[in-house]
Image (cartoon, rainbow, N blue to C red):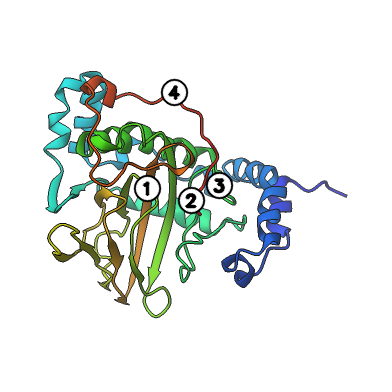
Amino acid sequence: MMQQTSLTRARAIERPSRNAILQRHPSVHTFWNQNRALFQEAWAEWETTDDGKAVALDEKLYDDKLRAAVTQAWKEPEQESAVRDLWEEVFPGVYKTQFFDPDRLSVLRTYMDKTACADIPLRPPYGISLNRGGAMLDRRSEGYLAAPKFQAFYESLMDRYMRPISRMLFPDIVGYDTQTFGFSIQWQADADTSLRAHTDASAVTLNINLNLPGEDFEGSGVRFFDRATGKVDELTFAPGTALIHHGNVPHESMPITEGERSNFVLWLYGEHGQVPHLGGAPKPIEPRERWKTPEVVSDGFAPF
């Protein structure tokens, strides 16, 4: 009898029920931990299949202007103003830019669609109780998307783009940005409708719209609340654009009434979930310190 590979074993394994997952039953925690190595091996094997080899994830996915400015800032941190100029403050403490090139975004979406169809168990984001799509992206999470090619892309996004940009826009988060966390979401009309007003357990949150050009939807804007003035505004963002803000900015996703919306939601925070105090004084650092990857090992803490 032919010996089963890690991929075939992972695909055949009995999985927890959706209710057990959403209720966070102890058996679900055991399932992910006992099979962690198996699923990692299965994802590495999947990448050698035609589906896994079909898509290349690299920096060509980023908007040309952003990629050029970030590349220059890593070489000459004193030139970081070119990155700063690409971010528009669209609400107090909320900034927006074109993050991914919409004409190339289909590459990333195709890859994510293929991983969703790989039939390897993936854990949905518990914090999004109605969400039926999406996956955990960071290796600290149970049941994360462990495909090596994706992990290399994800870690580069966090280290080369999100952290230095966050330090530039929000100086108070320095020291509270060594740990990474991320998940994907798919909102579907009549299924995954909205997410009530909340704050994030992060120092800073980056929300990237992964919808393709022409992949329209109705509703599903993000409503922000300004603590200081009481101002409320609902923001929408086009394919490949991103919003970035402190995690303590109250916000909610409004009901989606037609179509689908796909997003990456990415967080930074300090060791063991530490975040800066509201209104805390920023720590002054030189540009060269911003454009630097902290030499800190993952603490393994996952907010959910």
> Residue at left 65%, top 47%?
39
Along the line of sight, which residue is nearer the eye, 70 or 207?
Answer: 207
Instruction: Give the mark, 2 or 3, whose residue is nearer the N terminus.
Output: 3
Along the line of sight, which residue is nearer the eye, 236 or 227?
Answer: 227
Instruction: Give the mark, 1 or 2, whose residue is nearer the N terminus.
Output: 1
Q: Report, in whole angstroms, how far the alpha carbon at label 3 lies from the one at label 1.
A: 37 Å
**Badge number at residue 214:** none
* Residue 1, horizontal then vertical, whole percent: 88, 50
Instruction: Give the mark, 4 or 2, whose residue is nearer the N terminus.
Output: 4
Determine crowd level at label 4: few under 14, some 14-19, many 20+ residues with C-alpha closer than 10 A: few
Q: Report, in whole angstroms, how far the alpha carbon at label 3 lies from the one at label 4.
A: 36 Å
Q: Report, in whole angstroms, how far the alpha carbon at label 1 lies from the one at label 4.
A: 20 Å
| 139 versus 143 height, above or below | above
Q: Is residue 56 visible?
A: no
Say what amino acid the circle numbered 3 marks: Asp
In the shown orientation, is residue 155 left or right of residue 203? right
> Residue at left 25%, top 20%?
288
User: Which-is-in-front pick, marks 3 and 4?
Assistant: 4
Instruction: Give the mark, 3 or 1, whose residue is nearer the N terminus.
Output: 3
Residue behind mark 4: 295
In the shown orientation, is residue 1 left or right of residue 40? right
Dot 2 lies on which element? loop
User: Which-is-in-front pick, marks 3 and 1?
Assistant: 1
Asked if disc 1 and disc 4 are in contact, CB closer than 8 Å, the reply is no
In the shown orientation, is residue 29 left or right of residue 223? right
Determine crowd level at label 1: few under 14, some 14-19, many 20+ residues with C-alpha closer than 10 A: many
Say what amino acid the circle numbered 4 marks: Glu
Residue behind mark 3: 50
Quadrant of residue 275 in the image?
A: top left
User: Which-is-in-front pick, marks 1 and 4?
Assistant: 1
Dot 4 lies on which element? loop
Asked if disc 2 and disc 3 are in contact, CB closer than 8 Å, the reply is no
